Image (tube, rainbow, N blue to C red):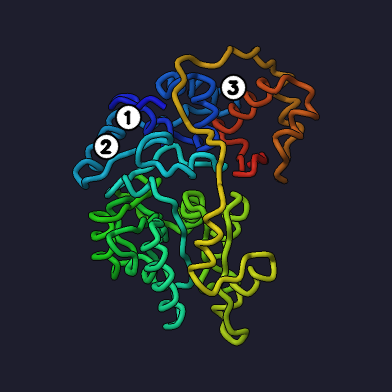
Amino acid sequence: MRLLDWTQRRDWIRLSQSENVGPATFRQLIDRYGNAAAALEALPELSLKGGLARPLRVFSVSDAEAVMERADELGAFFVVAGETGYPPLLHHIPGAPALLCVKGNLALTELQSVAIVGARNASAGGRKFARQLSAELSEEGYLVVSGLARGIDTAAHEAAPQGRTAAVIAGGIDNIYPPENAELQKLIGKNGLLLTEMLPGVVPRAEHFPRRNRIISGMSRAIIVVEAALRSGSLITARLAGEQGRDVFAVPGSPLDPRAEGTNKLIKEGATLLTSSAEVIESLRTEYTVSLNTFSEPEAPIEEIAEASTSDRKLVLSLLSPTPVDVDDVIRESRLPVAMVLGILLELELAGKVSRSTQQKVSLV
């Protein structure tokens, strides 16, 4: 895609941070209106048609410019899908971030990436094996990706030589978490690569971590889980990796260790049992291509669609419930033009009446 200028980048930030605009909605708006500026102008009317009784909260120009200035002060900046610094494999996952705040060596995103994740309360053996995997994969030219958490994540980042590691964090680029990794985060931001979809100043909350995890798996060719309890963020990352078509490897462990319950379960469910980095490297030698569906600002918006009537909107709304349903099923059952149904769902999303999952399912809020 052509690079965005300063004003376009500001508008992308504004659109991505406006009320009820998630990654999927962002993509639809860009596709429909051609650019972020036109989409921003259309937001109030769209949300009104969707049934929002008050003005939609649009991220202001001054706030977006302040965010850009803060990122610049921190030595970071925003990249959008298709630009240098935006991980190539991340482009095509469902719900790909519209833009990322990044800091560090952007050339690292040109390397094939392997994620290493696992328990925060990792065993000494687990940490040792994570370090071994990280060092050997890095020496082979792979970028080691993890989430900068305690335990396995920290071990993986620390062992990657020559700064060949990327940390995806759940808060703003200036947020240090966990506190004991302050120096490590600083070092990665200097020699490696820090990435987040959050704005500077954002403190991570519980709901941010699954979103962070989809980026870890989405930018990686393969995911290695070293240790994980049955209910852990690492298993969420592994599940997302499977949905994204990535290779999932799991390190087996003792049935007596709760930290091995999750990895042993992954192996039972089809993950590849891993005992050495050579097994990952051999797997990654196979040809791997994806059809990248990147965000971009087309030269012109798509062809104008027919205006939906009140009865059309009522029909689509009647087909929805709190139980998620495939968008394709809504289109089929409504017997309305595809573009019209997508437009109605977009209006309902902006009005906060409908939510959309990364699997292209919609449900009433």
In-image side of 358 versus 142 (left or right): right
Residue found at x 68% / y 25%: 341
Disc 3 vs disc 2: which is toward the camera? 2
**Quadrant including the N terminus:** top left
Q: Is residue 265 visible?
A: yes
> Looking at numbered disc 3 in the image, what kind of residue is underneath it?
Lys
Spatial separation of the CA atoms under disc 1 and disc 3: 26 Å
Q: Which mark is residue 49?
A: 3
Q: Is residue 88 left or right of residue 245?
A: left
Instruction: Report if residue 233 is visible in the image.
Output: no
Element at label 1: helix
Total number of numbered labels? 3
Q: CA distance from mark 1 to mark 2?
A: 8 Å
Secondary structure of residue under mark 2: helix
Other residues around mark 1 within 10 Å, as few (<14) / some (14–19) / many (≥20): many
Which residue is more in the foreground, 41 or 143?
143
Whichever of labels 3 and 2 marks the residue nearer the N terminus, that label is: 3
For mark 2, what is the residue?
68
Q: Are dots 1 and 2 in contact, CB under 8 Å?
A: yes
Disc 2 marks a residue whose amino acid type is: Met
Residue at the image position 54 percent from the left and 78 percent from the top? 259
Q: Disc 1 marks which residue?
A: 10
Q: Secondary structure at mark 3?
A: helix
Q: Quadrant of residue 47?
A: top right
